[in-house]
Image (cartoon, helix red, strand yellow):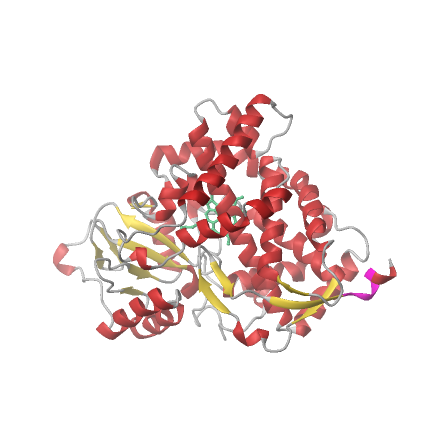
Amino acid sequence: MDQNIDELKELPFPSPEAGRSTLVALITKRNILALLEAVHKEMGNIFRIPLPGFKPVFLVGPEANKFVTVTNRNDLRWRSEGDPVTEVLREGLLVTDGAMHDNIRHTVNPALHKKLLEVYFERMLLRTNQVLGDWKNNQILDMLIEMRKIALLIIIDTLYHQDFTHELNTLWVDIKKLLAHISPGIWVIFPDVPRPGHRRSLKKLDDYMYKIIKERRNNPLPVNDLLGVLVNAEDFDDNLIRDQLMTIFIAGHDTSTATLAWALYLLASHPEILKKAQDEIDEVIGVEVPTFEAMSRLEYLDKIIREALRLYPPIHIGNRRAAKDLVFQNYRIPSGTRVVYSIYLTHRMEKYWPEPTRFNPERFNSENINKRPPYSYIPFGGGPRNCIGMAFAIIEAKLVLSCVLQKFDFDFPPGEFKKIHPHMGATLEPSPGVKLKISYRPFVTQK
Ligand code: HEM
């Protein structure tokens, strides 16, 4: 620390009621976003939340995001021992630090390189059509479920070269249990409270991961997918490979599920934007099969996805622990403090996002993008540990949405829209789901 210690300020707390309300909301509703918004408004961009035994500091805004993800990233650790995420991912890329992290990232990176996206695109298309092929005219479907099916089939097919169709049934409940286990809840405050009910599910998913590792070792394939890259990596044993497979499986499908479900929710509630997006798809793709090349020409759809990620960033916070005393804007952050950078609150700062709650894809018109400072839009995090699956996720979202919008119209069944609210699961997801009534667009019945 360069500053004189006497000049530094202590991290401020909001009123005790705010702390109590946060605690109650976290335990009963699993949603503290409204409270955080209120505290942010009252306190500004730096505040602590007084939870029992646990007083995280929230840092909000572009400067804070840069401080956490770039400038001080080496002194802010990702791994948190005893945390359910660490328990499940073990030594996965997402929960390791230092040289070990860098080595894993270096190994995993080639499998997510942009140049492979075109190869993955064909598998993404196949899996999307597999699910859409089951949709019936005038059916009511929960898009949170449908999009999860697509995202699971895609991540396993593209990166592990496996068909997950059978496992969608046999492992569905286990996947949901595991996601519930790692979602924020009472364990955040009372880590020692026993939380039974996930071990069997974890074991079943582990068995699946070890099975596909063994199969690949016995039958090497001439593909550069993630499983192949890991099996060929010299210093990766089966346990370390399992940890990466589990990490990418969870990080790579639950986020895309939430993104797609939110985008469909926003489109269904803004028919004029939906119409404009369908017009673009009709013009660029028409009734043809979507191509990789066409994706770059879906500019309006691209903005819709970016705006959905602004309003409902699936990863709405980044969680770290200070490894030494730090200083941010003259505030002292003692070593050991839980430091949280808030993507959600940054994305709703009026200063950068006028009428922040409005769904307005035009914010991403090129003339508007340049008006905002770097790190004011960070749905994929920032710095060298930003999302490794960003390009994959964007192409996947574009492809899935273009297939849905090309073939279907949709609307909320009566009373459904009002029920939907953000829920802090493993990601920020629409709860209780996004039920939509879908109908074939005219050209589908013509074909
Ligand atoms: C729309 C979808 C996605 C969103 C919004 C998203 C968001 C994020 C964010 C915000 C971070 C950084 C978190 C932090 O700073 O604490 C991150 C990291 C990560 N993401 Fe994603 N992600 C998405 C899709 C994916 C996909 C498809 C994959 C894998 C194929 C993936 C794998 C990862 C991994 C492994 C990390 C940790 C990287 C590291 O620590 O080096 N994500 N993601």
Q: Residue at x 58, y 74 (%)?
A: 417
Residue 312 seen in this snapshot? no
Q: In front here: 425 or 255?
A: 425
Residue 353 seen in this snapshot? yes
Residue 19 placed where, x, y %?
26, 69
173 with respect to 149 (left or right): left
Q: Residue at x 68, y 46 (%)?
A: 127
Q: Residue at x 58, y 53 (%)?
A: 148
Residue, far right: 446
401 with respect to 21 (left or right): right
Give the quarter of the image for residue 82: top left
Residue 115 placed where, x, y %?
63, 38
Residue 67 placed where, x, y %?
34, 53
Q: Is residue 321 above or below residue 186?
A: above
Q: Is residue 105 above or below residue 299?
A: above
Q: In front here: 311 or 364?
A: 311
Asked if residue 301 is among those painted magenta in the image, a careful observer would answer no
Q: Residue at x 57, y 29 (%)?
A: 228
Q: Is residue 131 above or below residue 412?
A: above
The C terminus lies in quadrant: bottom right
Give the quarter of the image for residue 362: bottom right
Residue, far left: 6
Q: Main secondary structure of the magenta part?
A: helix
Give the quarter of the image for residue 306: bottom right
Asked if residue 442 is among those painted magenta in the image, a careful observer would answer yes
Q: Which residues are magenta?
A: 440-444
Q: In front here: 65 or 132?
A: 132
